[in-house]
Image (cartoon, rainbow, N blue to C red):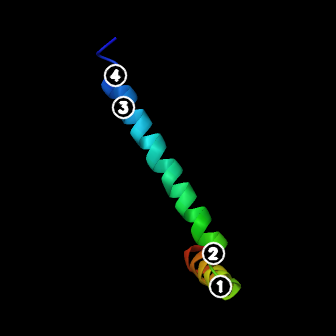
């Protein structure tokens, strides 16, 4: 089935990129200090309050 091979390649590439993004995010959240996490929480809370109607 040679017609279906490009589609499979696209799906595999998307899957690999998603896995890499998830791994990078996990590494970032694991190795950032707690102060950074608290700042991010405060920032996201501010954004959430801003975009709340």
Picture coordinates of residue 7 (x, y %)? 35, 27
From the image, tell me which residue sits under label 4: 5
| Residue 47 x/y as whole percent | 57, 78
Residue 44 or 26: which is nearer the viewer? 26
Q: Nearer the viewer, mark 1 or mark 2?
A: 2
Residue 39 image position (x, y, % from top left): 63, 86
1 or 4: mark nearer the eye: 4
- Whole-Å distance between the Cαs marked 2 and 3? 33 Å
Left or right: 51 with respect to 17?
right
Q: Secondary structure at mark 2?
A: helix
| Pointer 3 residue | 9
Dot placed on the residue nearer the N-terminal end, 2 or 3: 3
- Say whether marks 4 and 3 touch (CB < 8 Å): yes
Residue wearing tag 2: 31
Q: Is residue 19 left or right of residue 45?
A: left
Question: Quadrant of residue 26 in the image?
Answer: bottom right
* In the foreground, 11 or 46: 11
As helix, strand or loop, the secondary structure at mark 4 comes to: helix
Between the C-alphas of marks 1 and 4, the distance is 46 Å
**Which label's residue is closer to the chain start, 1 or 4?**
4
* Marked residue nearer the N-terminal end (1 or 3): 3
């Amino acid at each position: 089935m040679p017609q279906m091979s490009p589609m499979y390649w696209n799906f595999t590439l998307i899957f690999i990129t998603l896995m890499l993004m998830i791994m990078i995010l996990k590494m970032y959240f694991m190795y950032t200090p707690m102060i950074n996490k608290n700042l991010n929480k405060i920032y996201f809370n501010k954004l959430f309050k801003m975009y709340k109607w």
